[in-house]
Image: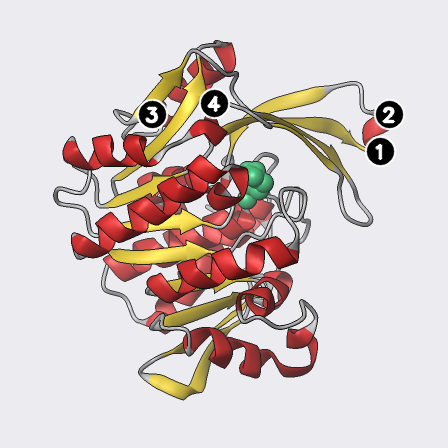
């Protein structure tokens, strides 16, 4: 029995050990990644049970994912092994300046072959029994038509089961264009209770140009809120986070980020943020406290290499919140 259910593609990520262009990268560290799996691990470390629906290939990478998720206490009874396709992989360079290049090897992967039947089987198997929350991201519907249908299927079944639904927009422009993504993400946002995203992602959900939030962030937030969710959370990275809720349409809550002395690897920080936010809401904390926890989890993740490495435990999070600063010396 898990409090939070999520679904998507869990990948193996190879991250260059040294900063520099991918063309020159000769050594890589191997990590388990994938936005929704990162959230599940984040929740588990924060003391909340999470289960993951997905597929991996019948290969060593799939086994690495199983071992990792199982070891973190994530429920993987509904993580199927697909003998007909490999586990998805990604390669990432590291940059000290400018955006880092990512190469996916996930087209036709096992994870992208998720189906509505997989979700229905998981639900018939009782995955929603005792669950309170479904978390989805905008990556899964970008993977394939069947994964898109699986995402919508999960949302419909979760709605019927009375779960709270969160959508992390996670617009991946290497998987689809803004034009292709907008109507799909919008429909998912309409069905969600909580929508989280960066300003440009939320603008796309709102049907506006991706730079619309530069001039009118509040307008973009309100446009997403008008689609139906009761909470819209804007992740602004180093500038912290901001939210609008249906209870207080005109008054936003903003919280600053924890200043980091060094951003080691920002990838996965958004997932850590989601885990912190969901965990706080499950703990019945206020929206402001949820933002503070989310920011702290994001900072902790960005301070280490790999998506899941720095996801804090409850004790680590408490220590970070108590000191409130990002110097490694202050994290006890
Ligand atoms: O949020 C981190 C993810 O972007 C990363 O783990 C890989 O899921 C991934 C994706 O599709 O980009």
User: Is 233 positioned to the left or the right of 45 in the image?
Assistant: right
Dot 1 corresponds to which residue?
21
Q: Does mark 3's beta carbon lie closer than 8 Å to ligand 1?
A: no
**SS at mark 2?**
helix
Decide which of 109, 97 is in the foreground and name it. 109
Q: Farthest residue to the bottom: give it.
A: 250
- Among the two numbered marks 4 and 1 on one chain, the one whose residue lies closer to the N terminus: 1
Q: Residue 185: x, y in percent? A: 49, 58
Q: Residue 228: x, y in percent? A: 36, 73
- Among the two numbered marks 3 and 2 on one chain, the one whose residue lies closer to the N terminus: 2
Does residue 231 lie above or below 328 as drawn?
Answer: below
Q: Are marks 4 and 1 in contact (CB under 8 Å)?
A: no
Q: CA distance from mark 4 to mark 2?
A: 29 Å
Dot 2 corresponds to which residue?
24
**Residue under the point 13% across and 42% down:** 129
Q: Are marks 1 and 2 in contact (CB under 8 Å)?
A: yes
Q: Farthest residue to the front: give it.
A: 145
Mark 1 against mark 3, which lies toward the viewer?
3
Q: CA distance from mark 4 to mark 1?
A: 29 Å
**SS at mark 3?**
strand
- Among the two numbered marks 4 and 2 on one chain, the one whose residue lies closer to the N terminus: 2
Dot 3 corresponds to which residue?
79
Q: Does mark 2's beta carbon lie closer than 8 Å to ligand 1?
A: no
Dot 4 corresponds to which residue?
110
**Residue under the point 29% across and 61% down:** 281
How crowded is the residue under tag 2: few (<14 C-alpha within 10 Å), some, or many (20+)? Answer: few
**Residue under the point 33% across and 25% down:** 79
How crowded is the residue under tag 3: few (<14 C-alpha within 10 Å), some, or many (20+)? Answer: many
Quadrant holding ligand 1? top right
Q: CA distance from mark 1 to mark 2?
A: 6 Å
């Amino acid at each position: 029995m898990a409090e939070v259910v999520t679904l998507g593609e869990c990948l193996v990520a190879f991250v260059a050990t040294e900063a520099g262009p991918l063309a020159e990268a000769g050594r890589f560290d191997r990590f388990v990644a994938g936005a929704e799996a990162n959230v599940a691990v984040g929740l588990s470390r924060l003391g909340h049970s999470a289960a993951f629906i997905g597929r991996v290939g019948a290969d060593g990478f799939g086994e690495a994912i199983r071992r990792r998720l199982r070891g973190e206490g994530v429920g993987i009874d509904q993580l199927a092994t697909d003998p007909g396709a490999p586990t998805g992989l990604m390669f990432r360079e590291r940059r000290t300046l400018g955006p880092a290049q990512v190469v996916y090897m996930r087209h036709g992967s096992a994870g992208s072959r998720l189906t509505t039947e997989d979700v229905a089987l998981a639900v018939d198997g009782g995955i929603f029994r005792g669950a309170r929350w479904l978390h989805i991201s905008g990556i899964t519907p970008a993977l394939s038509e069947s994964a898109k249908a699986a995402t919508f299927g999960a949302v419909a079944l979760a709605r019927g089961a009375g779960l709270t639904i969160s959508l992390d927009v996670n617009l991946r422009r290497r998987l689809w264009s803004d034009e292709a993504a907008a109507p799909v993400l919008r429909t998912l946002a309409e069905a969600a209770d909580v929508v989280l995203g960066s300003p440009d992602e939320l603008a796309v959900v709102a049907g506006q140009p991706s730079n619309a939030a530069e001039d009118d962030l509040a307008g973009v937030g309100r446009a997403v809120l008008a689609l139906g969710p009761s909470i819209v959370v804007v992740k602004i990275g180093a500038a912290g986070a901001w939210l609008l809720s249906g209870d207080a349409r005109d008054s936003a809550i903003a919280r600053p980020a924890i200043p980091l002395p060094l951003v080691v690897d920002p990838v996965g920080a958004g997932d850590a943020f989601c885990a912190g936010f969901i965990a706080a809401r499950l703990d019945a904390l206020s929206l402001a406290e949820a933002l503070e926890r989310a920011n702290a989890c994001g900072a902790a993740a960005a301070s280490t290499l790999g998506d899941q490495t720095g996801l804090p435990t409850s004790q680590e999070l408490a220590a970070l919140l108590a000191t409130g600063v990002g110097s490694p010396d202050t994290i006890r």
